[in-house]
Every structure is written in structure tokens, then in C-alpha cells.
Amino acid sequence: MAVKTGIRRAEVEAGNVPTQRTAPPCDPFVAFHINKGLVRKYMNSLLIGELSPEQPSFEPTKNKELIYEFRELQATVERMGLMKANHVFFLLYLLHILLLDVAAWLTLWVFGTSFVPFLLCAVLLSTAQAQAGWLQHDFGHLSVFSTSTWNHLLHHFVIGHLKGAPASWWNHLHFQHHAKPNCFRKDPDINMHPFFFALGKILSVELGKQKKKYMPYNHQHKYFFLIGPPALLPLYFQWYIFYFVFQRKKWVDLAWMISFYARVSLTYMPLLGLKGLLGLFFMVRFLESNWFVWVTQMNHIPMHIDHDRNMDWVSTQLQATCNVHKSAFNDWFSGHLNFQIEHHLFPMMPRHNYHKVAPLVQSLCAKHGIEYQSKPLFSAFADIVYSLKESGQLWLDAYLHQ
């Protein structure tokens, strides 16, 4: 007897297996798994039957033609070799982070601990931390090595030893974000709605109609400068990462984190003492936090934010992401996350290949009438504030008049 909710055997054999029942059959599987043969072996146990011949392969909420052409694009990308990393690129990237780290310490050792060397040291360390953040993102997405083992090992080294954060915490949050970007209650990156901010036009009006006012959202574009960029890392992430590892008993992550704090203490305490070390540490986290928030939010906050409407993989990614123009500085400053559209469509693609696939993605969007947004860096920053102001005003109008 045919089972309506089953998975077609042909899809299992082709690797077109969903990671969750609401996802399109092929695309999340391809996007997130580096060793598809191994994962397919374990997913076969989830085969529960065949779909009846009269059952549609696509739900009405899915764009069948777009999905088909995107899968053709995936095959083209594979043939072009765009999923293969240039290991020299990532080695040099790691070396430049280590050099920044050493230069920060040498600044204090050579020039003393007066205000100017101290500030220069903080800037150099902040730069190293921000760039290490972009590099751990590469390893976390399995986009550097052809095997998961080496990617995971280097991910632990960069995020754990160089930054003092748990790899499991990043994986837990970040892959939820990629699966359902800008979908309320499914993307943890927008969990600041509604307790701190009213995000997106639809959700803000909904909040206003419900007469909910956790914050004065019509002023959120102003208080964003106080509780957003300066506070996220030093006031929230800094304590939450320890809560996470103890709550979930992630002792391997904790060991890597301890190695970071031991290294920083042994390096800087002889020069600065305990108070100076703490001052430097939180200044670095403050500077890094501003860098991190502006870069990570410029691609998503101004875009469409809503409840999950069960759209296809490609449409879900495209409506939630935008790009920032390519330049040597923008690529370095954002860790190539200025190519956010390409990153979300091909999360395992090495970042140095984003610009090569971008014209193909633009053509796909143009053919299907989908807007492909790319803007200057400072326009992208300004759009964060403008979108917060707009959604705050929409909340207020709905709160007062609907």
C-alpha cells in the first residue's frame, strides 16, 4: 500500500532526502552535507514507503521551476570546481590572524603600556578576533577541507583556542539560521523580536495590533546604538557561552576555551597586571562586537522577516539575504559575507569562489523576477537603522490605530 507521507525511493538513491519534513527534498541535504554518501546511508532507515503516483511532488508553496533550475546550477557549480577550496588562501588567512595577534603583544612589549600603545594593542587584537570569527565560520561550514574531520578540528582550534568560544554553540545556532533565515521562532538570529526590537514589516504590525509593547519600538533605531553593536559580545555572548557548555556538558569545547584564556592571561598579565588584562579584554570584546553586529546584520535585518511560510529552499534564502558590493576591503572586512546571497545558497562553497558564482545567481534571479540586491557598504549599514525606524513606526501606527 502506498504511503502518502513517504519518501520516494528514487530520491533516497539520488541523495534527494529531506533533513526535515517541511524542506524541499534535495536542497538542504546537498547544502549542508559534505559526505553525502555517508549521510545517505543513515537516512535510508527513514524510508517509510512510496508516494502514490497521483500525489504531487511539489507543494503549492514551492516554486517547481526555480528549484529545478537551481539544481541545474548546483551541478554546474560542481563541474566548474567551485566547491573546491584553495588551501593556500586559507593558510595565508590564518597566518595574517596570527601575525595580528603577535603584533598586538609586541606593541606593548616594545612601546610600553601607556595609553597609545594600549589602544593600538586593543585595535590589533580586535582585528585578529574579528578575522578569526570569519575564519571559524569557514571551518564550521566545512568549506575548507574535503573531510569533516579536518574541518571540525580546525574549527575547534580557531573558535576555541583563538577566540575562546564553543564550536558546538556556534553550530547549534548558525545552522538553524541557515535552514530558515529570517523566519520568526525558527531563526535564532532574530530572537531579539519582540523583547528588544520589532523586526520586519509584517511582525511589527502584528505586534502593534496585539497591543504589545515590551520596548518603545518607535525609538528602536536610536537605542540600537546602545544595546546592539556595543553590547552583544561583552554583555551577552561572554557569559552565555559558559552557560551553554556547562548546561550541555560540552567538555571538549570547554577545554579549548580554557586554552584561550590561559594563553591570553600568560601573555598579557605580566605586562598589564590583572586589572589591565581585564580592561584590555573587555575593550577588545567591545570593539569586536561593533564590527561583528554591523557586518552580520547588514545582510538580513533590512530584508523580509516573517513567520515560516513553508517556501522552497531557494526562495527562502533569497528573500532573506542581500549583498554588499565586492571590493578588496569589503571582502576582507566582512570575511566575504558581503556575498551573503551566494553564501546562503551554497553554504559549503569556499568564500574565495563566491564572486565566480555570483553572475550565475544573478541570471537565475533575473529569469524568475526575483530581486538580487547588492549595495555599497555604508548604505548597507544605514539600511539597518532605516529598517528599524520603519518597522518601529509601523508598530506604533498599528498600536495606536488598529
Image (cartoon, helix red, strand yellow):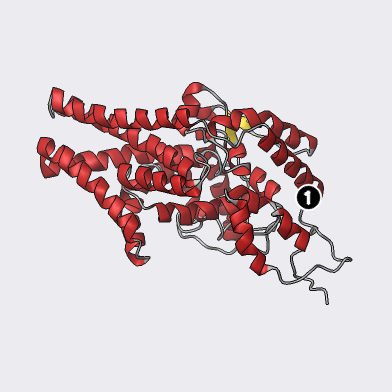
Residue 3 locus on image (x, y percent): 79, 73
Residue 373 locus on image (x, y percent): 64, 34
Measuring 13% from the left and 40% from the top, which residue is drawn there?
269
Give neighbour class at mark 1: few <14, some 14-19, many 20+ (Cα, 10 Å): some
Question: The residue tagged with tag 1: helix, strand or loop?
Answer: loop
Work out whether residue 280 can be spotted: yes
Q: Nearer the viewer, residue 53 or 178?
A: 53
Residue 112 locus on image (x, y percent): 12, 26
Measuring 69% from the left and 54% from the top, which residue is drawn there?
15
Quarter of the rendering occupied by the N terminus:
bottom right
Figure label count: 1
Measuring 38% from the left and 65% from the top, which residue is drawn there?
248
Query: Looking at the image, which residue sits at the far bottom?
Result: 1
What's under tag 1, amino acid-wise?
Asn
Q: Is residue 294 left or right of residue 179?
A: left
Query: Looking at the image, which residue sits at the far right?
Result: 54
Q: Which residue is mark 1?
A: 63
Quarter of the rendering occupied by the C terminus:
bottom right
Work out whether residue 180 can be spotted: no
Q: Is residue 89 left or right of residue 44?
A: left
Measuring 62% from the left and 45% from the top, which residue is drawn there?
320
Residue 185 locus on image (x, y percent): 55, 61
